[in-house]
Image (tube, rainbow, N blue to C red):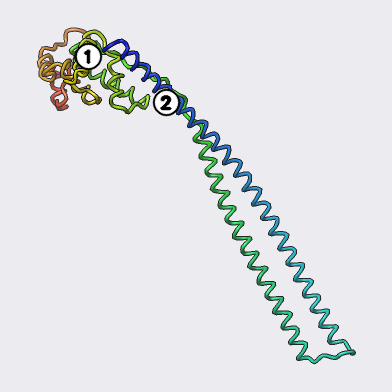
Amino acid sequence: MSGSNVEETSEQTRGREMEHTTRGRGRKDKSRDALANMEARLAKVELAMADTRERVDLIEQGMEKGLEDLREQIQDLREGVLGSQVQPVSHGEFMSFQDKVMTMFASVESRMETLAARMDARDQEIRQELAIYKTAVSSRVMATHEAPRVEVPKPHTFSGKRDAKELDNFLWHMERYFEAIALTDEATKVRTATLYLTDNATLWWHRRFADIEKGTCTIDTWDAFKREIKRQFYPEDVAYLARKNLKRLKHTGSIREYVKEFSTLMLEIANMAEEELLFNFMTT
């Protein structure tokens, strides 16, 4: 892999990290703006609800006073008509007149009740909207208390040592690194991983990269890269060799060293049952 390609890939990786950080800051700023806008809308809703309630109270007071005045006017009119000697009115005519007035009175009262019902319904709607806004604002406030940003450590390098544990650890740490910097592009994963190859592993990648440029080889996904690097550096018959070394293992030094060596071998044997593990530990 040429020096210019390494530098280009390194710049792309750093750019992705900066983009990830900038994107995180942008989301935080947008969250703050949304919270400020929501708080402003919440204040407007509260003012509208208070104004609506005040209007309802004034209308109700005006209606009550108007109805009372209308009752008094009807009573005065009745007394005046009945007591008048200038132009006497029959009882039937007066009752007909009174029915008309009372019908008008009932109509006005019905309209007032309908208006009051509408105002109450609107008041309930505003209260519900207010409750929703308060809940949303509370959620936004909780969301803005983000966890402190954690610096992502760089993965360890791999030198090309034919050791299953070292290669497995290298690949595992690279995958955790990809997750931490939100790297999802397969080709970029491959280019990034090759930046952490040293010694024999770098020489191997030089040859593979030359094959890629010639078109005789394709390694453009993370799975393909893992398959190729394991084919080159992963020891053959790892489990067999681990079992063989396990039989040779003897407890001659400190218990700590013995447990360490035993555990290392066990990690290379994936399908050993717990009973067999315990037996080997107690008899070696």
Q: Is residue 153 above or below residue 70?
A: above
Residue in front for this viewpoint, 50 or 269: 50
Where 225 falls versus 127 (above or below)? above
Residue 279: mark: none
* Residue 92, above or below 73: below
Residue drawn at 59 percent across, 60 percent down: 121
- Left or right position of 199 against 54: left
Name the residue carrying label 1: 205
Comparing 153 with 104, the one in front is 104
Q: Position of residue 160 (x, y in %)?
A: 21, 11
Front residue of 271/172: it is 172
Q: Is residue 229 visible?
A: no
Q: Residue furthest right?
A: 86
Residue 20 disc label: 2
Amino acid type, residue under disc 1 in the picture: Trp
Residue 220 visible to an observer of this rendering? yes
The picture places residue 272, in percent across and down from the top left corner, at 14, 25
Which amino acid type corresponds to the residue marked 2 in the rendered image?
His
Q: CA distance from mark 2 to mark 1?
A: 28 Å
Q: Quadrant of residue 73?
A: bottom right
Which residue is painted at 75% across and 64% down in the image? 62
Find residue 254 and report its image quarter: top left
Report which quarter residue 40 is drawn in.
top right
Mark 1 is surrounded, within 10 Å at the Cα level, by few (under 14), some (14 to 19) or many (20 or more) other residues, namely some
Residue 258 position, x and y percent, is: 20, 12
Quadrant the N terminus occupies: top left
Is the residue marked by circle 2 packed among few (<14), some (14-19), or many (20+) residues within 10 Å?
Answer: some
- Disc 1 on helix, strand or loop? helix
Q: Which quarter of the rendering shows the C terminus?
A: top left
User: Does residue 208 sit above or below 81 in this rendering?
Assistant: above
Mark 2 residue element: helix
